[in-house]
Amino acid sequence: MNEREFKIHFTPGHVEVVQENVDIPYRRVLVTGATGLLGRAVYKDFQNNAWHALGCGYRRAQPRFLRCNLTDEDAVRAVIQDFQPHVIVHCAAERRPDVVEHHTEAALNLNVHASGTLAKEAAGIFLIYISTDYVFDGRNPPYGENDAPNPLNVYGKSKLEGEREVLRHNPGAAVLRVPILYGEVERVDESAVTVLWDKVQEGAESCSVEHCQQRFPTYVNDVARVCRQMAERRLQDPSIRGIFHYSGKEQMTKYEMACAIADAFNLPSSHLIPMTEQPAGAGAQRPQNAQLECSRLELLGLSVEPIPFKTAVRDSLWPFLYDKRWRQTVFH
């Protein structure tokens, strides 16, 4: 689509407003939670592949993204009516299980009620709702798309209820369940994977790291590609709907992730101590092994071969290594 855009040209002693033709891709995608770890990756992937992307967030939205309170039905309706997206990728969620456990009402408002509102307002628009492996109890993996959910914690229950609300209000929507995520973080504590970086860098002092639950760390850039491929296929094929699973393939405990991170940066890991029992008061209960079986995406040719963990985690964390060395060099 060709549109006209106004630009201001400055030269010494002269200001001129000119009109220029600008090519805007005709395919439009709205990304909620675009300020978050997954949302940033999804927004970037669509934008880099000939989509007109609009990202919305709340506390961290401006100036890059649109500020929108997803619990405000009128605000959601206005954004959808103004932008008229072909696709919505709903990444916004309260995804920290321990926070959900203690701030349940706010989490339910976002994970369930806002998702239902969005689905209702997005009637006729392809909506991808990002969900979680925590809808399963982890006692009998791997879990297929049709296996019965049985969440152990309030977070998993809220996301399962969100799935049901979305599919009830928008039967043509898709649910994409993913496991523990990591990627290019703004702070290392933005992901339950990259937060291990602090323990890896301790070096001199021994650190206990959980070695009980089996996880499948999944790179947000891979998830973003899957979302885009689902969206592009859906524009031609209305059968792309319902529940899908996507996951990294490398099985690790958090202790094994920390050792892999150390290895990726040629750092020692002998100070890391595997903790084989959960301490009392460890927060929300987690599934032992909620491995996702991802055959539906694979059979449709919509899956993505995951980037190896060590490669992706190095790309995600190297700025923090550089920053620390730079500070030590300059200030010490």
Image: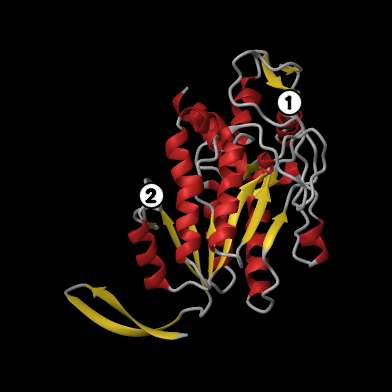
Q: Quadrant of residue 148?
A: top right
Going 55% across and 54% down the picture, which residue do you hit?
165
What residue is shown with label 2?
58
Along the viewing direction, whichever of 50 and 54 lies nearer the viewer: 54
Going 74% across and 48% down the picture, which residue do you hit?
247
Going 70% across and 72% down the picture, which residue do you hit?
239
Q: Which circle's residue, 2 or 1, is located before the other in the chain?
A: 2
What residue is shown with label 1?
255
| Residue 22 in the image, given as x and y percentages of width and height | 42, 82
* For residue 236, above or below residue 128: below
What amino acid is found at the position of numbered circle 1 in the picture? Tyr
Q: Answer with left or right where residue 39 lies relative to residue 280.
A: left
* Residue 35 visible (yes or no): no
How many badges with numbers are in the image? Answer: 2
Q: Answer with left or right where residue 66 lies relative to residue 122.
A: left
Disc 1 residue crowd, few under 14, some 14–19, many 20+, Cα 10 Å? many
What amino acid is found at the position of numbered circle 2 in the picture? Tyr
